């Protein structure tokens, strides 16, 4: 399957997708973070073809999200355990679970996040850890960072980060440098 | 391209991926949420083949993440604007940006979330909106919800949600009902 790689892009979302964006990878991480360890259990949980599961598990090991551990020597059997990098992916999946429950679960939640001390369902939100404030525009916006390429800086200069109603701005590019807009796939 | 659909799965993560899991879709949403509106601008930003971009934009419109709006009648030209459902996807992308910046940006962040009032970089965390507490195991775990299928309940009963070090539990399945583990692809 031919597919453009996101690896050379500098955007952290693109780089993340390069590691977990293949079909199946996030569901494998979902199961791994939920305690699934063994090949057969992943296969049963996901109803995935064994060769595809092997491929995806190997990729997640190579990328450092899962660690392969021998749990039986005779016969040799491995289990797959989330690394710190893999465990750190949990917020992405929880944010996706919340979004899915809000928008694609008309019959109610099939799974949900629960506070084990109260039994209450929790719909988690993203906040600024320094202030506890919810992350919302226009107080919080994405901007180029210290390692931004000129291209990234230009891209952000050309757009409206608060993403209000679309307005036609025919002249918005006239003051921008004449960068080769298609010269690079970097993000 | 043949690919198993996640549409019939009940898991909200799988259902989300059915809508945004195709290669490119999340980067298109990243750009749309950052203010990109027009076909040519998406194409320039992403360096994506036009036929693929058309396909992905149409899918995101069908799924209700983007709305197509006519901005010019002669010639007819459309722009793509995030719907409330699309805007609600932002936390997933921000969580992914944080993860990418932590793990795949050795040269420093190329883009980052910033508090516009202080100029400070923010590394957002997921919290329980009721208590402000960070979402961490074992206080917060994913459990079957009211709409869980028998299969989902069984799956969660068989696993260790806190995902500690893997332990061999040879007898852990003996007390579970003899469900047809591969009979369904539902999640």
Image (cartoon, coloured by chain):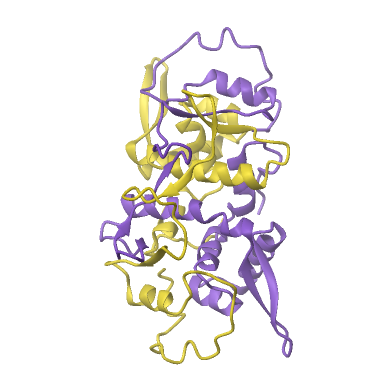
Chain colours: A purple, B yellow
Q: Does the rendering let one see residue B127?
A: yes
Viewer-closest of A83 and B156: A83
On screen, residue B107 versus residue B71, left or right, reads: right
- Image point (66%, 24%), residue name: A151
- Image point (61%, 45%), residue name: B100
- Image point (32%, 50%), residue name: A103
Tell me which corner region of the image, top left, top right, bottom left or bottom right, holds residue B51: top right
User: Where is A72 relative to B66, above or below?
Assistant: below
Viewer-closest of B176 and A120: A120
- Image point (55%, 40%), residue name: B52
Residue A140 location, x and y as percent?
46, 30
Q: Does the rendering let one see residue B18?
A: no
Viewer-closest of A55 and B72: A55
Viewer-closest of A173 and B150: B150
On screen, residue B88 versus residue B47, left or right, reads: left
User: Where is B54 relative to A113, above or below?
Assistant: above
In the rendered view of the protein, which quadrant contains the N terminus of chain B? bottom right
Residue B72 location, x and y as percent?
39, 17
Residue A34 location, x and y as percent?
49, 68
In the rendered view of the protein, which quadrant contains the C terminus of chain B? bottom left
Residue B31 location, x and y as percent?
51, 32
User: Where is B102 relative to B42, above or below?
Assistant: below
The image shows a total of numbered marks equal to 0
């Amino acid at each position: 399957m031919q597919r453009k790689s996101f690896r050379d892009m500098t955007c952290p979302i693109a780089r993340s997708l390069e590691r977990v964006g293949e079909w199946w990878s996030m569901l494998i991480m979902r199961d791994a973070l939920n305690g699934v360890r063994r090949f057969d259990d992943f296969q049963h949980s996901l109803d995935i073809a064994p060769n595809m599961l092997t491929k995806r598990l190997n990729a997640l090991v190579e990328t450092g999200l899962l660690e392969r551990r021998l749990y039986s020597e005779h016969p040799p059997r491995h289990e797959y355990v989330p690394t710190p990098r893999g465990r750190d992916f949990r917020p992405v999946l929880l944010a996706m679970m919340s979004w899915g429950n809000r928008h694609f679960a008309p019959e109610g939640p099939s799974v949900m996040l629960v506070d084990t001390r109260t039994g209450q369902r929790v719909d988690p939100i993203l906040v600024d850890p320094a202030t506890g404030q919810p992350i919302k525009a226009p107080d919080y916006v994405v901007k180029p960072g210290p390692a931004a390429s000129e291209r990234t800086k230009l891209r952000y200069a050309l757009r409206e980060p608060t993403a209000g109603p679309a307005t036609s701005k025919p002249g918005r590019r006239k003051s921008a440098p004449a960068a080769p807009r298609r010269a690079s796939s970097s993000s």
